[in-house]
Image (cartoon, rainbow, N blue to C red):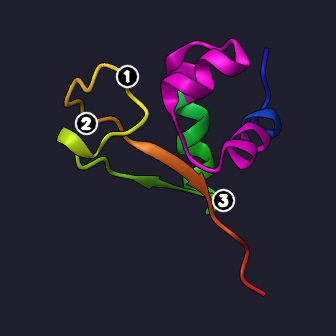
Amino acid sequence: MGSLLQLRDALALRGQADTAQLSAQLNLSVALTQAMLERLVSMGQAERIAAAGGTGCKHCPQSRKCRTETYRLLTPER
């Protein structure tokens, strides 16, 4: 089973990713991955980026006009 640290590291390596991508990479359920991402957001370590939907989606080969939210890590302030 994946840990919150593994999820954070995977997100750091990707830069930005959605729940499905991280779930597949870490072999976790989408529900668990979503809960872990929300935990990172609540801890102030990550942020949710609302997708614009439509033609702006570059990672989806089918151009399904989905509204997938992506996440990215926040850089700590010094």
Residue type beneath disc 2? Arg
Given residues 46 and 68, the one toward you in this image is 68
The answer to whether marks 1 and 3 mark residues whose Cβ atoms lie closer than 8 Å is no
Q: Nearer the viewer, mark 1 or mark 3?
A: 1
Q: Are marks 2 and 1 in contact (CB under 8 Å)?
A: no
Q: Nearer the viewer, residue 44 or 67?
A: 67
Q: Separation of disc 1 and disc 3 at Cα?
A: 29 Å
Q: Secondary structure at mark 2?
A: loop
Q: What residue sits 26% from the left and 26% below the top?
A: 63
Magenta region, residue range? 8-33
In this view, which residue lies farthest toward the bottom? Answer: 78
How many residues crowd around disc 2 within 10 Å: few (fewer than 14), some, or many (20 or more)? few
Residue picked out by circle 3:
45
What residue does disc 2 label? 67
- Residue 52 in the image: x percent, y percent? 24, 49
Q: Amino acid at mark 1?
A: Pro
Residue behind mark 1: 61
Q: Quadrant of residue 59?
A: top left
